[in-house]
Amino acid sequence: MPQRVFITGFGIISAIGNGADETLASLKAKQSGIGRLELFESALCNIPVGEIKKSALELSELAGIEHNAHNSRAFLLGLIAAKAAMQMANCNSDERTAMIGATTVAGQDLLDAYYWPMLEGTLVDKKMYQAFTGADATRRIALELGIQHNVTTISTACSSSANAIMNGARMIRSGLADRVLAGGTDSLVRFSLNGFNALEILSPTGCKPFDQNRNGITPGEGAAFLVLESETNAAGKRKYGEVRGFANLNEAYHQTLVNPDGIFAETAMRKAIEMADLQPSDIDYLNAHGTGTEANDLAESKAIENLFGDQLPAVSSTKGFTGHTFAAAGAIESVISILAIENSLLPPNIGFANQMSETRITPVATATHASINNVITNSFGFGGNDTSLVISKAE
């Protein structure tokens, strides 16, 4: 029989705070972290973003390491969250501890400082090249924490860290590891900001998930990691939740667009619920992918309605707080789901004012007290990589 997968620790940093307490306070107060871009100069400086208002030096201090030019924001944010997760779980790495990280932009915040000198023929330390690779942040975090058993990086766009959690749970269920540190990290960089501007999906006002007048995404940055442990390993520990079900499907519909009928998103949720040995009516809260784009929110709304019918759970997207943190989104929203369970709190959906004409989805408007036993959280990436996780109250 597969081992159950319990969450014994977690760490989070985003535009709404560093750690569980600051994050929870922002959720309760409906205090968004979205504001003006200050990290770097850009022609898009008036586009709202979910920025962490800390320099690389300040992040290095928070991470407890010496500041140097090789430290990308992705590495620093990830290390802060990973250390917090391991500390909460009161554990150290051993020969049965694995790590699965996730990122999309990796260390590309360092490009500006080194791209032009490279063009002019100036030799650049090879550590700079390493920072640009997707695996660098995971590798360096694992080295800091002494994790050697299995270290892997996943990059499936916006579902990356949800897939890290899913694969960590699979490793534990199959007996390949006793403990897995799983999550993701991404920072705001010029490359991704310009890229989404080229796709014409940046919101000029701040994202409004599931609103009739939604007008695009709001880029954000942040990191979150969860410590997953087998039932045997977690014996006697405080358990903050259980990863009870998961599913991943690839639509292969379009490079960036989702299938408009939502059938693959519906199937991912259905399969995750079935693995958890639950019924759709058992889901108390749905933390939606909810990017604020016209296509995504409509397709996800259809998927939710098709799956749940007349018994819709409470629904909200928390990207109005953090912005869309890309590879880190699934892990950040999993931590928010854990906080929802732990504090009997339905997080509000910032930016919602008018119901979409095509569906019946009316997101949670204000932070609301409710008994929450089972949460489903969605992360849907470019290319149609759809992942749903069921996180339940630990029994």
Image (cartoon, grey):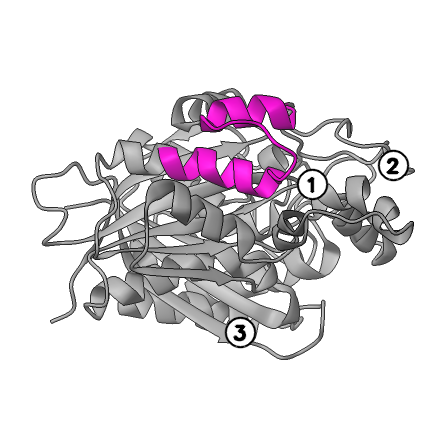
Residue 291 left/right relative to 250: right
Foreground residue among 63 and 43? 63
Q: Which residue is mark 2?
A: 42
- Looking at the rendered structure, the secondary structure element under dot 3 is helix
How far, Cα to Cα, is label 3 from label 1?
29 Å
Name the quadrant of the N terminus. Answer: bottom left
Residue 66 left/right relative to 165: right
Q: Residue at x 71, y 75 (%)?
A: 254
How far, Cα to Cα, is label 3 from label 2?
37 Å
Q: Which residues are magenta?
A: 54-83
Q: Which residue is mark 1?
A: 188
How far, Cα to Cα, is label 1 from label 2?
12 Å
The three-letter code of the residue at mark 1 reads: Leu
Q: Which SS type dominates the magenta stretch?
A: helix
Task: Give the mark nearer the N terminus: 3 vs 1.
Answer: 1
Q: Are marks 3 and 2 in contact (CB under 8 Å)?
A: no
